[in-house]
Image (cartoon, grey):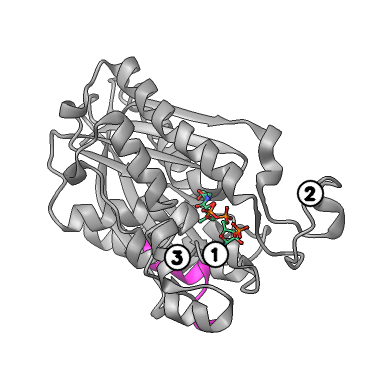
Amino acid sequence: MTSESGFPCGVRIAGTGSAVPQKVLTNSDLAEMMDTSDEWIRKRTGIAERRVCTPGKESAFTLQRDSLRRALDDAGMKGSDLDLIIVASVTSEMTCPSNACRVATALDAAPAGAFDLVAACSGFVYAMNLADTLIRSGRHKAIGVVGCDAMSSVLDYSERSVSILFGDAAGAAVLVRDDDPNKGSIYQTIQADGESWPSLFLPRKEEDIPPDSPDVPVEIGKLRMEGRDVYRFAVSKFKDVIEDAMESTGLTVDDISQFICHQSNVRIIESAKEKLGLPDEKVYVNIERYGNSSAGSVGLCLDEIRRDGKLKEGETIMFVAFGGGLTWSSSVWNL
Ligand code: UT7
């Protein structure tokens, strides 16, 4: 927990940015493509519309690049000021090279280190925690963290119970070393349990599908999800993760100014709010406009909240996410 000079250091969010595709896909648009309705989707998920990439023009890479460029602009920094870029995504175009390497090149960040991190919807919070730890170790000074998924590239729009939920988005943060050791993540968890992985997965070939998986009419290469299983996991994990962070830090709801949560389904968020007594104004929700953008959602919320002027120096916020893997992660963060 020291800087290069040997003194303890903290971590500051120097800038944030986000990027979403131009094209809006409404519930009514989906109702023309499959047997669903605006009413069903709003009631079961809280989603009215989502953004989807236009192939050939936008992609996971362009969203990742643009969100980090905006975060750098917000911080008043250049790509060459970064010494590491972490891109959390399950929809990067290729596994080699990582999209982080391509983003680094596009932003003139070489020779900054660059890698992709795969933790599905938990990816942005995993990456924020990792970046915080690397900066505190004294080995890194400035890290660009991106959470992004272009879910439209892995959805089978003939499967109504999965495809209506997701959208495309990216959120980014530039984290820098700060002399105040109290700034940054004061408590964090990065956790997973692979036992239930078949409840949410992206098979590349037929053999990837476990023999006891339900026989669903979803193409290979497209997302498969047991919605009800994931729903049950998310509802209990959301509550447990926040309770664990509160107990471990001794903080109460009154001490946290914002809970910045993965936008999975508004019913999941409402259930956590009710069980934990979280007031509306402390739990930001934008799922109505963007759907569930997997690793993109927490960073997108962070950027919108920050640009609204709702985050103030000296305040404490909490990041919470959970998703495929199954994975989950939290971070209590002093601004
Ligand atoms: O980001 C982290 C990972 N993902 C999540 O957190 C997602 C968690 N799960 C969910 O959000 C919900 O399970 C969904 C929104 C995906 C699905 O909602 P649900 O209330 O769990 O619906 P269901 O799949 O249990 O289906 C209930 C009924 C079924 O009809 P019957 O069998 O009761 O007659 C479905 O066929 O609703 C039907 N249905 C639909 N009807 C209209 C399923 N999808 C649709 C649809 N439109 N799009």
Local packing at callout 1 (Cα closer than 10 Å; few below 14, some 14-19, many 20+) is many
Q: Which mark is residue 41?
A: 3
Whether residue 275 appears in this view of the structure is yes
Stretch in magenta? 54-68
Instruction: Identify the residue under disc 1.
Output: 151
Q: Position of residue 222 (x, y in %)?
A: 68, 64
Which of the 4 image quadrants contains residue 43?
Answer: bottom left
Of badges 2 and 1, the one in the foreground is: 2
Local packing at callout 3 (Cα closer than 10 Å; few below 14, some 14-19, many 20+) is many
Whether residue 108 appears in this view of the structure is no
- In the image, what residue occupies the spot 69% across and 56% down? 202
Local packing at callout 2 (Cα closer than 10 Å; few below 14, some 14-19, many 20+) is few
- In the image, what residue occupies the spot 52% across and 44% down? 231
Instruction: Identify the residue under disc 2.
Output: 213
Quadrant that contains the N terminus: top left
Sequence-earlier tag: 1 or 3: 3
The answer to whether the residue bearing label 3 lies less than 8 angstroms from the nearest atom of ligand 1 is yes
Sequence-earlier tag: 3 or 2: 3
